[in-house]
Image: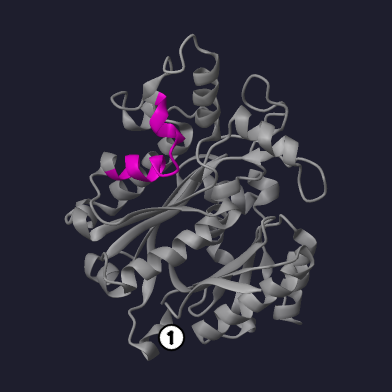
């Protein structure tokens, strides 16, 4: 076992350590339900799975896909500068645009004070494959589409988002698989505590593509079968509670703690997740009976459920499962789980109630995040 990342306490217990309370004071989403958080809220609360295309969403695709319906970057951002945007980049730029419009001009009056931490998976595998194929099959290796080359970079979505919205604070890309959203949240908290910025946009983005479908189909799932694929992006504003209050923003959640570990053997992942949750609770100064909602990843559902049962004991919080609703969104998975928890506030409505986001990824990473209901 190796502990690879941990943050906390960040919520109400932060006063005991002299650290400010960090809150999520706004969020937006682009998902298989559509553009905007209300579409996600309606879909999650109704339990309605987003529409899936049985044969994928592109030529040669064979893995079922849950894609953002009828999404065109130009429809949300205008035609200028969007022609060569990949879907994952366009998702991120659009989600940030939605959030900043809602927050108002005050949120960006000091661009140097706003950081961006964005979780990704393998980058744009479609762009990488297309560019490589072009170099190998064209009449000359350099006869490639140069405009597509930036999309092969891992930090393309975060960099383009910062340029588009003129954000000048720290700009970080976290490549963390299905737990990228959890890792991004923990990293953002550390950036704040290090004094690098006053507020941060934090989230994760992922796109569906035939190339990604091909890789997933070849690898198979934990049980040897390929899972339906999803895509989307979630972005939230992380800032001190005092700053949110001064700006008149009502927090949607406090960030109590995050904790991530590495399981050396597949069979130990459940035990490591249970240890993660206990560590997060300890850092938040909370007990398991305060957890009212759990949003598990579901990649290894049996081990994950067993770990949660062990930690919560006789207490049975509501479990909100995103994977059957939105598919395997890879890098956006944990961020979608967090957004679903925020949307399902009716399950943890009282001050002090906790929502728990958990995950076990196939690379051995396990982790969780504790969100609290603010006053």
Look at the picture and state if 188 lies above or below 53: below
Rendered location of residue 296, percent (x, y): 66, 61
Residue 150 occupies which quadrant of the picture? top left
151 with respect to 222 (left or right): left
Which is more toward the observer, 341 or 144? 144
Look at the picture and state if 21 lies above or below 206: below
Rendered location of residue 133, percent (x, y): 55, 21
Residue 155 lies within the magenta run: yes
Residue at the extreme front of the image, as rendered: 140
Label 1: how many Cα within 10 Å (few below 14, some 14–19, many 20+): some
Magenta stretch secondary structure, dominant: helix
Name the residue carrying label 1: 13
Which is more toward the observer, 196 or 250? 196
Residue 231 occupies which quadrant of the picture? top right
**Residue at image x 45%, y 71%?**
255
Q: Quadrant of the C terminus?
A: bottom left
Residue at the extreme top of the image, as rendered: 139
Quick check: can you spot residue 357? no
Residue at the extreme bottom of the image, as rendered: 16
Q: Quadrant of the N terminus?
A: bottom right
**Residue at image x 65%, y 45%?**
328
Rendered location of residue 117, percent (x, y): 39, 55
Rendered location of residue 183, percent (x, y): 50, 61
Which is more toward the observer, 289 or 204? 204
243 with respect to 71 (left or right): left
Residue 311 lies within the magenta run: no
Q: Which residues are magenta?
A: 148-162
């Amino acid at each position: 076992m190796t502990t690879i990342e941990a943050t906390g306490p960040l919520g109400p217990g932060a006063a005991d350590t002299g650290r400010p309370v960090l809150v999520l004071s706004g969020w937006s989403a682009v998902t298989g339900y559509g553009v905007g958080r209300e579409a996600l809220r309606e879909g999650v609360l109704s339990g309605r799975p987003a529409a899936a295309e049985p044969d994928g969403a592109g030529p040669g695709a064979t893995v079922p896909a849950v894609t953002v319906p009828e999404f065109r970057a130009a429809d949300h951002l205008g035609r200028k500068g969007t022609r060569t945007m990949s879907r994952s980049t366009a998702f991120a730029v659009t989600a940030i645009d939605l959030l900043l419009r809602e927050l108002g001009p005050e949120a960006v009056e000091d661009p140097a004070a706003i950081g961006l931490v964005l979780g990704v998976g393998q980058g744009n595998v479609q762009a990488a494959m297309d560019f490589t194929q072009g170099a190998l099959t064209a009449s000359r290796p350099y006869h490639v589409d140069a405009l597509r080359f930036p999309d092969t970079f891992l930090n393309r979505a975060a960099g383009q988002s910062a340029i588009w919205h003129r954000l000048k604070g720290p700009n970080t890309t976290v490549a963390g698989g299905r737990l990228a959203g959890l890792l991004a949240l923990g990293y953002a908290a550390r950036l704040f505590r290090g004094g690098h910025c006053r507020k941060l946009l934090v989230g994760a983005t992922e796109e569906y593509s035939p190339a990604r479908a091909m890789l997933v189909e070849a690898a198979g799932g934990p049980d040897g079968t390929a899972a339906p694929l999803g895509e989307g992006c979630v972005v939230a504003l992380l800032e001190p509670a005092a700053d949110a209050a001064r700006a008149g923003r009502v927090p949607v959640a406090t960030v109590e703690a995050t904790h991530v570990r590495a399981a050396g053997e597949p069979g130990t992942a459940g035990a490591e997740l249970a240890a993660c949750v206990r560590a997060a609770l300890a850092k938040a100064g909370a007990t398991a009976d305060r957890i009212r909602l759990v949003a598990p990843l579901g990649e290894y559902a049996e081990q994950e459920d067993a770990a949660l049962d062990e930690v919560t004991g006789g207490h049975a919080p509501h479990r909100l499962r995103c994977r059957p609703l939105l598919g395997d969104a890879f890098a956006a998975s944990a961020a979608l789980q967090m957004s679903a928890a925020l949307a399902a506030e009716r399950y943890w409505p009282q001050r002090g109630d906790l929502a728990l986001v958990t995950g076990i990824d196939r690379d051995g990473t396990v982790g969780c995040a504790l969100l609290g209901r603010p006053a």
